[in-house]
Image (tube, grey):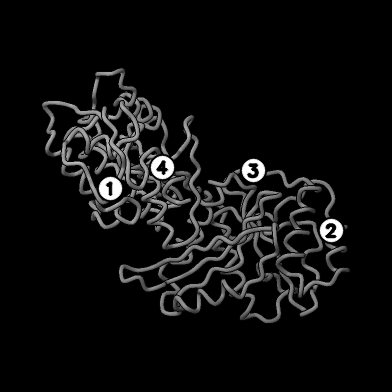
Amino acid sequence: MNEQEASDIISNASLPQNSFHYVVLVAEDANKQVLGIALASHFKKPNFFFLDFIATHKQRLSGGIGGALYERLREEAAACHSIGIFFDCLSDEKALSFNEEERKQNIARLKFYERYGARPLAGTKYELKRSDYSIFHLVFDGLGETHRLEGKLCKNIINEILRNKAGKKCTAEYIKEVSRSIKGTIKLRPAKYERGNELKVHTSIHDDQKIALVINEGHIIHHVRERGYLESPVRIKSILRELNKLSFFETLPSKKYPDKIIQEVHDKKYLAFLKKICKKIGNSVTSYGDVFPIRNAARLPKDIELQIGYYCLDTSTPLNANAYKASRAAVDCVLTAADKLKERHMAYALVRPPGHHAERKYFGGFCYFNSSAIAAQHLSKKGKVAILDIDYHHGNGQQDIFL
């Protein structure tokens, strides 16, 4: 199976609205060659997984690929706190098999899944012939837990499976017959092949499930204690102390990004001004906007104080060499986190100075570069992006840049 074939299988599957969503697991080698794929359906109500199929490369049938995919699916199901995994499997019983060769294959499959504690449901009429004369067991893997499949719950699950996964093969009468046969707590068929210890499901969090955490380690250099300055390093320290208590964050280093990405959001002249003025001021003193000249793009002021006032929105945002260094590093962190979304479900950039008050041409509110706007613009090339600004103060920067 190649990547295109795998894609075609997924795209051709019908997806009932608001019923379930697909989970696709792909096994690849070091050269990105697809070795196997598992397709499962996660039903939210009730919370269970249905394994649609596992397929492996025809030359790698005995390479452990199928086992690795199924074990990864078990981990996914456990992480979702689901009831377990259900799936159809052709019968291993003589009376219910088409021929002996097929029965041997069915025995091998059920023996494989029995290693994980997965066994067919007993005492229902699920094994009745369907319209295409096929006969299946409904197999259940409780993920190592002793689940009581109470009748009402089991009836609901089976109805969801038959209507969404086998509807074209099952008549309405078949579904009713199976449903009527479910009474009381449903048990599993006794183990026939693997009577030893069941393989446990791993509950550790995989790297691709962890939230990528990118921290602006260099933020500490920008700390001004005068004028009642509120934006201080203790913010990062306090947040990080709580994040370190959690197991689902993975700290990753930031990468360097070119100025041209910033220029997609901020005016080129403003970027040049901020870089030049901060270097010129240095770190021996800190400057603030005190004089605010009329903004005339054709006649930029030459005096340093007037230049600061020209590009500033308030009188309390400090400028020095470290202000630029820290805010520029924050941009790199946010862009790194944004790019991590190619391989992670979530990413969090923990940075200061903040950014949502910085407008296209002006700084203020302790903000120099609008990091969230830069990341949003960067991600917009891949699809739709929304900015949810939960700060107490109005995010004038995003409004100026995008509206």
Mark 2 or mark 3, which has the lower sequence index? 3
Height in image: 100 above or below 108?
below
Q: Secondary structure at mark 1?
A: helix
Residue 397 bears which disc, if any?
4
**Residue 59 seen from this side:** yes
| Residue at x-position 32% and y-position 50% | 266
Q: CA distance from mark 2 to mark 3?
A: 23 Å
Query: Residue beneath label 2, please?
Result: 179
Q: Secondary structure at mark 4?
A: helix
Determine whether, in the image, residue 192 is placed left or right of residue 136: left
| Residue at x-position 28% and y-position 47% | 332
Query: Residue beneath label 1, please?
Result: 332
- Using the image as rendered, state which of residue 226 and residue 49 is in the foreground: 226
* Amino acid at dot 2: Ser
Q: Secondary structure at mark 2?
A: helix
Nearer to us of marks 2 and 4 is 4
Answer whether labels 4 and 1 touch (C-beta < 8 Å): no
Q: CA distance from mark 3 to mark 4?
A: 54 Å
Quarter of the image where one finds residue 14: bottom right
Q: CA distance from mark 2 to mark 4?
A: 59 Å
**Residue 215 seen from this side:** no
Q: CA distance from mark 1 to mark 2?
A: 58 Å
Determine whether, in the image, residue 187 is placed left or right of residue 353: right
* Amino acid at dot 1: Asp
Residue 98 position in % (x across, y down): 71, 80
Crowding around mark 1 (Cα neighbors within 10 Å: few <14, some 14 to 19, many 20+) is many
Residue 186 position in % (x across, y down): 76, 50
Query: Residue beneath label 3, please?
Result: 146
